[in-house]
Image (spheres, rainbow, N blue to C red):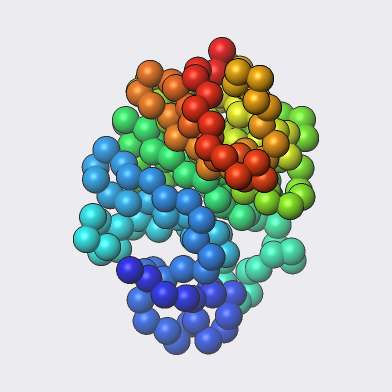
């Protein structure tokens, strides 16, 4: 489902079904409610659909023809600037990689912003392939790839950084992007420039 729309385009004000259309979507996750969560990256929002693709609700703080970057910074709590990775935990909380703000934002199941986790150091420094993705494990720890930091970050649900990992059995990450976590915390990582997928075990 979906087709193109740019909410920054004045013509979008006259278009229909803009809440079922995208501008460069990147991340997707399925919540415990069975709904599908999509980061609509270019429109700075998250769209939520039923399993059949029917629009349910959104997490959105108002990109419009009169409110666009860089004139408006999109840095306030709840605002998203280049949202990419997304994950939903067992309680329905939504985590979004708010890439240009170098933070992970946490929203409650209704879409209310309740926390933000700063990404440390230069792990999300702008550069080629800066597309961080997220995953959650069975106890709701959050994992984020850090493409420019060449590592994986592990946070608990309150945003405390628990650990990092950048290698497995002598193989060091070169550009980690996509990620998946099993219930036990075993992570699988797409290493883009190495043209590989790594089963990396657990983050200490």
Q: Nearer the viewer, residue 114 or 179?
A: 179
Q: Quadrant of the N terminus?
A: bottom left
Above or below 16: residue 35: above
Task: Identify the residue shown where x is 23% and y is 55%.
Answer: 51
Above or below 29: residue 38: below
Going by the image, does 1 lie left or right of 72?
left
Q: Position of residue 196 (x, y in %)?
A: 57, 40
Going by the image, does 144 lie left or right of 166?
left
Task: Identify the residue shown where x is 46% and y is 68%.
Answer: 22
Q: Position of residue 124 (x, y in %)?
A: 71, 40
Above or below 162: residue 119: below
Q: Position of residue 134 (x, y in %)?
A: 51, 38
Q: Quadrant of the C terminus?
A: top right
Q: Position of residue 25 (x, y in %)?
A: 49, 61
Farthest top residue?
204
Task: Identify the residue shown where x is 32% and y is 51%.
Answer: 36
Could you tell me if residue 75 is visible in this image? no
| Quarter holding residue 181 | top left
Going by the image, does 20 lie left or right of 113?
left
Number of numbered callouts drawn: 0
Task: Identify the residue shown where x is 68% and y is 27%.
Answer: 172
Could you tell me if residue 203 is visible in this image? yes
């Amino acid at each position: 489902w979906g087709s193109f729309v740019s909410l920054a385009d004045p013509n979008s004000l006259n278009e229909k079904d803009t809440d079922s259309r995208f501008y460069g979507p990147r991340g997707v996750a399925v919540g415990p409610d069975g709904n599908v969560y999509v980061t609509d990256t270019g429109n700075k929002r998250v769209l939520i659909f039923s399993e059949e693709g029917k629009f349910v609700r959104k997490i959105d703080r108002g990109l419009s023809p009169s409110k666009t970057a860089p004139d408006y910074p999109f840095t306030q709590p709840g605002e998203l600037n280049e949202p990419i990775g997304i994950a939903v935990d067992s309680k329905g909380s939504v985590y979004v990689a708010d890439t240009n703000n170098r933070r992970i934002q946490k929203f409650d199941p209704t879409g209310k912003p309740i926390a933000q986790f700063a990404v440390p150091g230069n792990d999300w420094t702008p550069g080629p392939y800066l597309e961080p993705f997220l995953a959650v494990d069975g106890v709701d720890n959050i994992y984020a790839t850090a493409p420019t930091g060449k590592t994986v970050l592990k946070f608990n649900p309150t945003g405390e950084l628990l650990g990092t990992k950048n290698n497995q059995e002598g193989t060091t990450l070169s550009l980690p992007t996509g990620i998946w976590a099993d219930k036990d915390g075993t992570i699988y990582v797409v290493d883009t420039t190495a043209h590989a997928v790594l089963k990396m075990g657990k983050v200490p």
